[in-house]
Amino acid sequence: MHAILVWILYPFLFTAALAMFFFGLSLVLPQAGFVARILVSYLALVACAIYGVTVSLIARPFGLQHSAQYATGRAFEFVMKYGAGINVIIEDPENYLNTVRPAVFIGPHQTELDILMLGAVFPTHCSVTAKASLKRIPVLGWFMALSGTVFIDRGNSKSARGAMQGAADEMKRKSQSVWMFPEGTRSYAEEPGLLPFKKGAFHLAVQAGVPIVPVVVANYSDVLFVKKYRFNGGNLRVKVLKPIETKNLTSEDVDELVINTRNTMITTMAELTAKQRGKPVHIDPKLGLSNVGVVKASGVEATTSALP
């Protein structure tokens, strides 16, 4: 037992000491702050993953395993706030995060730092979704299974709609919300914008008959932008939008639902980013609106103008 503790503790302490060294070096070499916060982030992830597995094991006999991801996320938010100087500001005046259940929560996927955003906004009785194959990965798969992750098995279905049926049934049976990133991958964008949305989250919401709750995050490339080795302390600004009901919709409505939701989220992202930066912003032309036009943002407001 002692040998196991030493094997875990020594690398942890060494990495912590290294992070402190780079934080000190950043006073004369600003780029060193990038390395320091990367190290702190990985330390926080490891520590919170261990905490999450422990919480999952304790909560499971009481039927509370679905709250383990919530508890783990809040722990990660706390560590990053005081360890890396990154604060999450949430605008949710109607308290949708805590009152809408079950639901499909969706948000933009900018960088790996979205894990921190999730840690701050993650509702109770909510879970991430994941490919069924991840169950077989040691530690990660165990934590996901223990904490109530909703697994989607694309291998046994020929369509996204078919793959979502099992997840939809589980949501209704357990009154369980899920979180999904409809972009499917990280955008790493320096200006506001969203990659094209995949339809899985929308098929899931329609099949389960639950609302979609868009959660928009201002572009935070001023805090983290990997291509320029930028990782600063600062704020991540989040806004929870009004739930979109899907009870009377069918699969034929999904395409229009995807376009309208994405456009609303891009417009809101422009507003939030302008508010965060205190100056006008430009939408990334490759990641802009679909079909209806372009966003012009000035100050804290963004307006839509039709394309000619």
Image: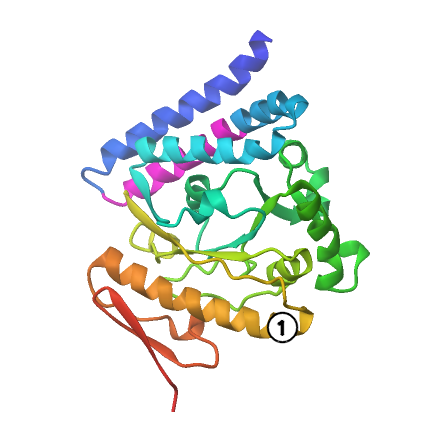
Judged by its main secondary structure, the magenta piece is: helix
Q: Is residue 226 visible?
A: yes
What is the magenta range? 30-49
Q: Residue at x 62, y 62 (%)?
A: 247
Q: Is residue 230 visible?
A: no
How many numbered badges does the structure rendering display? Answer: 1
Asked if residue 48 lies in the magenta stretch, the reply is yes
Q: Quadrant of residue 154?
A: bottom right
Q: Residue at x 26, y 55 (%)?
A: 276
- In the rendered view, tell whether residue 28 sits above or below residue 287: above
Image location (x, y in percent) of residue 46: 50, 30
Image location (x, y in percent) of residue 65: 62, 30
Q: What residue is pinned by disc 1?
A: 253
Check the picture and name the quadrant holding the C terminus: bottom left
Q: Is residue 136 left or right of residue 76?
A: right
Q: Nearer the viewer, residue 180 or 7?
A: 180
